[in-house]
């Protein structure tokens, strides 16, 4: 992989700060640098091999945005963190001149690059290697200490990760220093929409130059499906974001076009949102700048999920064994199911209880991965309390027999003859597969706050505090001339495709080729996937010629979109 583009004389981690609170941050960043350096500086995509090689994602790092300091805490972002990152998926048997399209994928709330691992592999397979996928790993992922997880994956021994993160053990000469605290992350208050759009812009420009004949597409899942249209509408000076692209892909999410923005006072001081998510710029600068779902979900559960994913994966040979990790998830399951008596469960069942849509109350964390067997399953007795904490949670189930041993199967809970869209084995792999992961440990709350004031795509060039005070330059939505592909799940967060109509109506009526948007199906193509929940659109089983129907449709749409919005040859980003 080529990583030689990072500016000469500017090396990640070259300056080790003396402040103690930055020591662990620098160590985490150095971990990423070692991965990149180990990958070498060969030319990305060059050379043809006689037989296809396995797709091994490579980490790319390029200079990114330089945020302003937190003005209340007087804390700068460490220079070592001002880089944009992505995992590159490609068929190494294809040279860069053979690539038809590059898809850059923006994850949603709490999402890491691994969210797109399965989708990337399937798009490459369905386009005979002529697609390259860049799965974006937002800058906050570089704060995570993956040492114990990476070693556990390498050695096929999840106990190494458990010992490292939860038992204070020294593993290969290194000891976990604990999860980062809010006072160590004061600079995250400035990691808002502008910073992330500039990071994304750096990656888009890099892809533009690496693949000079390829069409570029931006895909976003969940919150990412709001960020992607904002990028398209962003005024970068000599061009707008959409002018670098041939299309947008929205996965279980959409911008909130037409929504009235909150007041400047609400944004800055009085607060936006409600309950666990209520925040203002002032509170982020003075207290916790990381999005928190406590007391329901804490950072240690993100690591627990990766350990459960390892144990549930067939690669580790423990999938059908009884889970040894009740000590890690007992408090979570007690709150989830309303009982201190957590029944024994296999590793597969433990993972299923944590994420399957019948048991998981958080709609953005749901995936359809089968059903539990071995004991009584019934209505969740704690659903009322969960509803008070989290809002509407739907009809949740729970294991109700503390003496039973629960197992997991791929078939659906409501129809034993039907297999759920996602295979648990595939989902488990996404949770832990290196060099990144599925969950973002330290999600900057400023990003959500800023998306909330910009996703209406109604920022104006004059007399708009969002642009003048905070530089949110998403002013060009009415000019966006690229095709759109949007998909929702019938049981997901975009179950009503009519929500997309205001966005469609807000775009340029003619595509770049001159064709009227409404004259061609690909101009604004929508799909509703039956029985899909929020994460299914990323990982629904797609093997075989027919597959899941979604990924093949996406690949076919890109072929048409390249003609409807051909790459601009007059731009030099």
Image: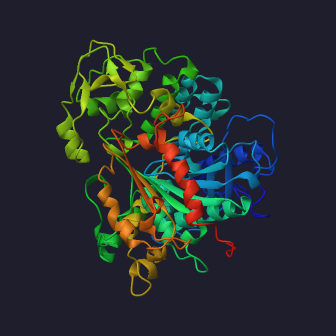
Percent coordinates x, y for residue 12 in the rendering: 70, 56
Q: Would residue 199 be found to the left or right of residue 37 on screen?
A: left
Q: Would residue 229 be found to the left or right of residue 209 on screen?
A: left
Percent coordinates x, y for residue 103 in the rendering: 59, 54
Q: Residue at x 76, y 47 (%)?
A: 37
Q: Residue at x 33, y 67 (%)?
A: 502
| Res 435 → quadrant | top right
Q: Would residue 149 be found to the left or right of residue 227 on screen?
A: right
Percent coordinates x, y for residue 195 in the rendering: 53, 66
Name the quadrant of the C terminus: bottom right
Q: Residue at x 66, y 65 (%)?
A: 205
Percent coordinates x, y for residue 172 in the rendering: 67, 29
Q: Would residue 344 be found to the left or right of residue 470 on screen?
A: left
In the displayed structure, would residue 320 be above or below residue 211?
above
Picture mark count:
0
In the displayed structure, would residue 411 be above or below residue 132?
above
Query: Is residue 282 visible from the viewing direction of this image?
Result: no
Q: Residue furthest front?
A: 519
């Amino acid at each position: 992989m080529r990583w030689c583009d990072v500016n000469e004389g500017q090396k990640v981690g070259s300056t080790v700060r003396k402040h103690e609170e930055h020591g662990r941050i620098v160590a985490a960043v150095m971990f990423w640098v070692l991965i990149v350096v180990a990958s070498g500086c060969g030319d990305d995509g060059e050379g043809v091999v006689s037989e296809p090689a396995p797709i091994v994602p490579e980490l790319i790092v390029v200079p990114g945005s330089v945020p302003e300091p937190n003005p209340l805490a007087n804390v700068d972002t460490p220079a070592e963190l001002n880089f944009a990152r992505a995992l590159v998926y490609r068929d190494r048997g294809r040279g860069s001149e053979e690539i038809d399209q590059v898809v850059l994928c923006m994850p949603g709330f709490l999402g890491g690059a691994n969210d797109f691992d399965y989708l990337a592999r399937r798009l490459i397979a369905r386009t005979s290697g002529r697609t390259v996928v860049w799965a974006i790993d937002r800058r906050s992922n570089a704060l995570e200490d993956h040492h114990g997880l990476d070693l556990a994956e390498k050695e096929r021994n999840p106990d190494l990760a458990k010992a490292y993160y939860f038992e204070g053990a020294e593993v290969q000469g290194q000891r976990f220093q604990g999860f980062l605290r809010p006072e160590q992350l004061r600079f995250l208050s400035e990691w808002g929409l502008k910073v992330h759009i500039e990071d994304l812009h750096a990656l888009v420009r890099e892809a533009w130059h690496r693949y000079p004949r390829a069409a570029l597409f931006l895909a976003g899942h969940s919150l990412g499906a709001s960020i992607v249209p904002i990028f398209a509408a962003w005024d970068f000076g000599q061009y707008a974001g959409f002018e670098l692209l041939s299309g947008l892909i929205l996965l279980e999410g959409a911008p909130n076009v037409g929504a009235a923005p909150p007041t400047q006072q609400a944004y800055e001081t009085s607060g936006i949102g409600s309950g666990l998510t209520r925040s203002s710029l002032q509170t982020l600068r003075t207290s916790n700048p990381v999005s928190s779902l406590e007391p329901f979900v804490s950072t240690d559960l993100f690591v627990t999920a990766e350990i459960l994913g390892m144990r549930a994966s067939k690669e580790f040979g423990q999938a059908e064994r009884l889970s040894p990790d009740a000590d890690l998830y007992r408090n979570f399951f007690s709150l989830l199911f309303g009982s201190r008596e957590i029944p024994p469960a296999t590793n597969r069942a433990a993972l299923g209880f944590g994420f399957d849509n019948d048991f998981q109350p958080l709609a953005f964390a749901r995936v359809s991965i089968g059903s539990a067997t071995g004991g009584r399953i019934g209505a969740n007795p704690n659903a009322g309390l969960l509803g008070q904490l989290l809002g509407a949670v739907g009809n949740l189930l729970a294991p109700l027999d503390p003496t039973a041993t629960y197992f997991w199967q791929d078939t659906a809970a409501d129809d034993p003859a039907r297999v759920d869209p996602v295979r648990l084995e595939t989902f488990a792999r996404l949770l832990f597969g290196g060099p990144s992961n599925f969950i973002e440990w330290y999600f900057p709350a400023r990003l959500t706050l800023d998306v909330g004031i910009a996703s209406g795509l109604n920022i104006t060039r004059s007399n708009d505090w969002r642009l003048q005070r905070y530089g949110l330059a998403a002013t060009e939505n009415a000019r966006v001339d690229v095709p759109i592909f949007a998909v929702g799940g019938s049981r997901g967060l975009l179950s009503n495709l009519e929500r997309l109509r205001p966005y469609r109506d807000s775009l340029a009526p003619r595509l770049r080729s001159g064709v009227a948007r409404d004259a061609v199906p690909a101009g604004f193509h929508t799909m509703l996937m039956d029985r899909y929940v929020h994460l299914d659109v990323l990982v629904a089983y797609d093997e075989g010629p027919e597959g899941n129907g979604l990924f093949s449709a996406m690949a076919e749409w890109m072929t048409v979109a390249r003609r409807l919005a051909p790459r601009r040859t007059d731009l030099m980003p």
